[in-house]
Image (cartoon, coloured by chain):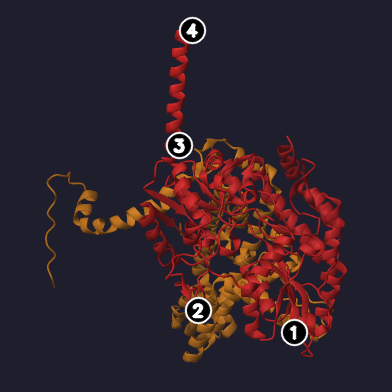
Amino acid sequence: MKKSARFLSLALAAILMLAMFAPIAAAETAKPETISFFIDTVYGSMMLESTFQPVVDKFKELTGITIKFIKPEHSVYYDQLNLSFASGEIPDLMELGSTNYPTYATSGALADITEIWENSALKASGVVDEQYVDALKIDGKLYGFPLAMGNGTITYVRQDWLDNLGMATPTNYDEFVEMLRAFTEDDPDGNGVDDTFGITAPGLINGETPYDIYLREFYQDAKPDFYQVDGVWVDGMQQPQMVDALYRLRDVYEKGYMDAEVITNNTSAAREKFYAGQVGTFNYWAGNWNVTIENNTTKNFPNAKVSPLPAIAGLYIERPPLALAISAACANPEGVFEYLLSYAYDGGEGQTLFTRGIEGINYELVDGEYKQKVDPENEGKLFEKVIGAPDLAFTTWADPVKLDQRVIDSKAMFMANRTFDPVPPATDVWKDNIAEVIAIRKEAIALAVTDSATTPEQAIANYVAEAQPFIDAILADLNK
Amino acid sequence: MTQMPAIKPNPHYRKSALRDRMWKYRYHYLLFIPVLVVTFLFYYLPIGGIRFSFFRYTPFSPPSWVGWANFERLLFQRPAFWTAFNNTLILSLSNLALSMICSVVLSLLLNEVSTRWVKRSLQTVVYLPHFLSWVVVAAIFTIILAPGNNPATSGLINAYLLKWGIVQKPIYFLADSKWWTPVYLFISRWKETGWGTVIFLATLTSISPDLYEAAQIDGAGRWRQMLNVTLPALANTFVVVLILNLSKVMNLFESVLVLQNARVERATEVIQTYVYHTALTAQSAEYGYPTAVGLFRSLISSVLVISCNFASKKINGRGIL
């Protein structure tokens, strides 16, 4: 008894000692000296010097850690990132889009940060909206932290055209089509010339997931992709609602309400047509783009007014967030998460630094109100963001700078009318076959809508006949 | 006249003629070393990458040997590859034939222009499109050929076709597989015919006037002179240009890519765009299969060039390889 009491007391003492040291051990995650960070952005290469360097200096001053940003040109970002892996110069941290994130994760390129996140002070603090973190989980495991909200597109309408025609904002599909007809046939700009049409888009199907992010009013509940129904993967092209969606698209195309060049449009061509007053409806990114679209349109038509539409038939789609992923080769993933990511998304001063930049350089206090300063890279434009866009913050962060009301309204409209799109699968069988399926799918949709000799049923039958071996392989793999 | 210094043979080497020459020109060889190094590093060393056509290779893990699996996949399991292969041959060979004919004809016409400044000006005008990037050219023709929703948004061609009553509905030239190939070949000729005349014009200006004078004395008119003097003089240049262009037959890429769209992508796919779509734009970072496709393309290119050189030797008595 005496012996066991001694043993028990020793054991309890040991547990107490461990319990005492445990928080210290957790708090003493090794601090990395440098963090290499591959980042993509549509901004130019000057951004490294003009935007990132002051933030790098400030972060080093605060933490003693040097961030080495690597920013290839946007068009070759993944070529350069793949090259860095192939050459063994693997970054600690990298930005990944929703198409590449699962590919990298399932290839073993990324560190599993599930435990790091679950045990982090950041999670415990409650500042993060966890639905965005959960959106990046693959089979229950987390390989990346959201860079920002996923965001998505929303339909913009020339409100001044609606007003000229005495029309109310459409609230259902029939009213929407009637609006397109009026924009095409009733001279909405009042110039007496037949020079307008209803709606444009950069293609009938998006180039990456979510494929149906544009033209939501027509796709509605149809999805030109693989998705799960009651836990079983199916091919959306072969679901009955796809035929209806294609007929809706075909109808407005045949009547001339939709841009006759929709297939050859890219995003800039579609935008330019809207700015040039050729078209009255256009689906594009919510939030900050609302202001850009209106500003560019009013340059040509000072009385133009651009309004976002509530979703009228199918909900808008929020794509999976961009991910900030720690590489599997990173020597200290806990350190990168704790010292950089936890700080950059702390909902406070760290997030201000990595979102708004530095006071005095990127924003300033004017008459008691914080205002954006001019972007050092783009004279004439206000500085927008360092990494995450302010309007796409997914924490409780209080932005010191007041957002443009149009951005707030557009984002609020989107958030009230959106559904999440999941991270796509990325098995080896998927990767080997998906390119063929996408090519055949794109052609089928284009023919169904724009070729009067091919009905949607025929187009889908042709698609099935040609793509079936690849579809079967993918579905068998996903459903096994 | 400056006396050349006597060559002092290096006593450390055997007195072979080759080594003497190398010793004599040792500084030339020294100057050549950077070229050799660059050629080796950037042209020969990367050839080692063809081994990946026998591997499943992603940047994230060591390559795993798959033997002939990638070749089996492209030859027997991917109809899209054969479409791309056929399209490559059809587009390239049509382009090559048209290029040779148009360039020779345009060269002959330009050569007939006697006023020097007019000739120079015309040459400049026809060369200019060559210096436009394919992206710009594609944008120009997309606008010119646009179907449009109304007269104000139609492209030039459809506007006139509708105005003259030739068609009732605008033609979507770039999205209709029937129209795409002729339109592509036309655009290629518009862009490259002028540049293709450079070598032929150089040859034409080097033909001895004596030959034309002799032909005139023999009573040959302009047409006869062209048939019996000009064209034979162009024959060797023609073969050289043909073989050089043939080596590029399988290299079609940018010009096709920028004119593709969802509706005609599969019908117009060529091998290089197929590699691009399967390797770079698909949700995959697997380089083994695209490398196998690239290797197959290179083999076909080599066969074409060697065959053409062989034919040239048979016909002309000499090749250029």
Which is more toward the observer, A187 or A86?
Answer: A187
* Image quadrant in which the C terminus of chain A is located: top right
Side of B29 where A396 appears, left or right: right
- Decide if residue A170 is on the left or right side of residue B137: right
Q: Are marks 3 and 1 in contact (CB under 8 Å)?
A: no
Q: Residue A139 location, x and y as percent?
A: 65, 39
Residue B72 position, x and y percent, is: 64, 40
User: For mark 4, does the 10 Å Cα neighbourhood hold few (<14), some (14 to 19), or many (20 or more) residues?
Assistant: few
Q: Residues within 10 Å of mark 1 (few under 14, many from 20)?
A: some
Q: Chain of mark 1?
A: B
Instruction: Tell me the tag on residue A23.
Output: 3
The three-letter amino acid code for the residue at tag 4 is Met
**What is the crowding at mark 3: few (fewer than 14 residues within 10 Å), some, or many (at least 20)?**
few
Q: Are marks 2 and 3 on the same chain?
A: yes
B58 w.r.t. A43: above or below: above
Q: Secondary structure at mark 2?
A: loop
Q: Which residue is mark 4?
A: A1
User: In the rendering, at what x and y percent does residue A377 appear?
Assistant: 46, 72
Disc number for residue B152:
1
Residue A71 place in picture, x, y as percent = 46, 59
Separation of marks 2 and 3 at Cα, in angstroms: 50 Å
Q: Residues within 10 Å of mark 2 (few under 14, many from 20)?
A: few
Q: Is residue B129 visible?
A: yes
User: Does B60 sit above or below residue B217?
Assistant: above
Mark 2 and mark 1: Cα distance apart in space: 33 Å
Whether residue A246 sits left or right of residue A134 in the image: it is right
Residue B320 vertical placement versus A277 (above, below)? above
Please say if the residues under marks 2 and 1 sit with CB atoms less than 8 Å apart. Answer: no
Assign a secondary structure to mark 4.
loop
**Which residue matches tag 2?**
A380
